[in-house]
Structure formats: structure tokens, C-alpha cells
Image: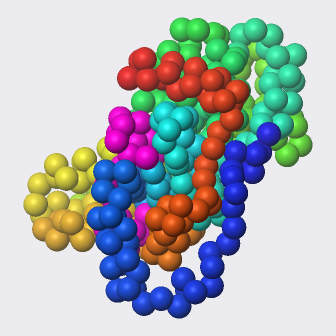
Amino acid sequence: MTIASFIQPQGMLPDHYRNLERTEMENRIREIKGKLGDKLFIPCHHYQKDEVVQFADSIGDSLQLAQVAAANKKAEHIVFCGVHFMAETADMLTTDDQVVYLPDMRAGCSMADMADIYQTEEAWVELQKLFGDTLIPLTYVNSTAAIKAFTGRNGGACVTSSNAKKMVEWAFTQKERLFFLPDQHLGRNTAYELGIPLEQMAIWNPIIGKLEYEGNVEDIKVVLWKGHCSVHEGFTTTNVKEVREKYPNMTIIVHPECSREVVEVSDMNGSTKFIVDTINAAPSGSAWAIGTEMNLVKRIIAEHPDKHIISLNENMCPCLTMNRIDLPHLLWALELIENGDEGNIIKVTPEVTEEAILSLNRMLSLA
């Protein structure tokens, strides 16, 4: 089962939207928002462009936005400014009477795409041969609905970067070993901080369909899927060293999707919410280097002129798939709704939803 099986129907942005002036698009979006009122809800992820964020009814991380959308019973149309897996989660958590839209169907997530359901099922069979019934799966919410469903039917759960420690602790009360996907870095950083040595962590390589580990497999406590965030993997120990040399008094805060090596030499690490909250609470005059997505870093810098804030890697590009959502695509999605046309709709099948909700609810019950 693929992302495509959940989407009805899709298409490319009509050419005339590319020729509109920014002011014209902004005025039309405001007009449609005013016309639809409470029937329309626009959640925006932290990594979205400012041109889109200005129209957000709520700004937050992926799961937070899906929960806010689910709590909004008045909205008939939820135009999710994020990526595929976020819109899928919103669709699964909202009612059948609510429709979730993604302004650009090409807005995917490279990390989520690194674990498809076919590879995952194959991996599970092989890992069962090695470890029997001692393994429990956890999936980062940055994964497809099909992967969430896989964890649901196999007794596992979802995790976020905010509650990863709590969920990993829970997992080890259920089984002896953990299968964590699709982000190896979040899994490794979380398990390490809970006291599991790196020597007891193995990598599952889905490309070759093999476990990568040197030693006795009986010693393995954590199996990490060989996936990563292309943005956060771009931060390096060299970046940290350069900041240390140039700004000795600067605090370095990074996302746990960064590599273990980068997290190890940084001062603090935590979820997007943790980073935002930490900077908000920091005293005036404090200095920060932030290792996360560039759109968010630029927004934080603009919101805190009293603090010295830089990106840990100032040559880093924004999340390219997130950036597919722009004013033309947002306006197009809203005009489809205004005209009563179907398009850019995200719909997860009932079967997948039922099992994925098991995974999500196991997490939410512990939140």
C-alpha cells in the first residue's frame, strides 16, 4: 500500500496561478477565508514559509496540529499546510464529515518515504526469525499511515520527538527489544539517553534487507531503521566546532533528529516545541545557535531581536518538500473548495485508519 492509494484525485497547479501577483493572491485568500468562516481551518507546521504561515489558524508540530484539527468540530474543510503524513494523521483523527486537503500533493517527507510498508513487513518477518516474540515496533509520527497501522496491529505505538523517551521506556515494559523506525537518529539518541549503550543498537538496512551489526545478535536491544531527516542530518560536528570558535558563549540547541555525534557535542537537544519554548523563555541578550529547519530559525530570529540567534549551519536550505506549499498552491486549494470542486484531498482507508488509530491511541494514553 502506498501514499497514492490514499489520495483522491490529484493534479498539478494550473498555470495561471503562477502568474498572479502576491497581493492579489493574499487578497483572494483573505476573501475566501472570510466567506467560509468557521467551515475552514488552516493548520500550518512550524517549517512553513512566512507567506503561508500568515494565514494559519494554528501553528505547531505535526501531531499537535492533527489533534487541534480533530478538536475543531465546526470545520468542514481542513487545509493542512504541511506534508503528506501530517495530513494523513489529521484525516484519521477527524470525523468522516470533515475533509482534509493538502495544497500540493508533492509535499512529501523524505524520511517517511524511507520506510514503505512492503520493506517494513519484510523486515518484520526477518527480525521475527532472529528475535522471536521479543520485539515491539515504535514508529515516529513522521511516517506513513500504513506504517502507523503496522505498529498498531503488532502491539506497538507512535512517538513524537517530545515524548520519545516516555514511549521508549513504555516499549521496554512490553518487550525485551525495540524496533524503531523510520528515523535512526531519534531512536539512537533517545535510547542512548535512557542508558542503552550504542553497542547494543543495530541497524536494519531496508535496501539490502539485512541487519547491520558486529557482535552477538543476542546482545541487541534496539533495532534502528536506516532512515533519517535530510534537513537535520545536514548539521555536523564541524558546524558545532566553528560556532564554538567564533561565539564561545553561545548555547547550541539542536533537534534530536540530528546525528548522535552532533547531539553529543551540543548543549541542548529537544523537539521543535522544546526549541521554540526554550528560546521564548531565554533572557534578553542571550546567544543561541539552533540546529533545525531554516524557515523556523529565521522566524525565531525575527521574533527575538533582543537575542543573538543564528542557524547552526547558515548554509542550510529549508525543508524542500515543506516549501512546496506556497501562496499559489494555498489559493488553488481554497478556490477548489469555494467552487465545490474535488481535488487535493487526503483520504486514508478505513482499514488502515483503524489499525493506525491503535498506534496513535497507545501513545496518546500515555501523554
Q: Position of residue 244 (x, y in %)?
A: 35, 63
Q: Position of residue 208 (x, y in %)?
A: 89, 43
What is the magenta range? 48-76
Can residue 195 be seen here?
Answer: no
Residue 341 counted in the magenta span = no
Location of the N terminus by quadrant is top right
Residue found at x 82% / y 29%: 121
Which is nearer the eye, 355 or 235? 355
Location of the C terminus by quadrant is top left
Q: Position of residue 199 (x, y in %)?
A: 66, 28
Image-quadrant location for residue 245:
bottom left
Tell me, what colour scheme is on the image? rainbow
Residue found at x 52% / y 71%: 332
Residue 58 counted in the magenta span = yes
| Above or below: residue 187 compared with residue 259 | above
| Above or below: residue 307 compared with residue 266 | below
Can residue 340 be seen here?
Answer: yes
Which is nearer the eye, 159 or 146? 146
Q: Is residue 82 left or right of residue 139?
A: left
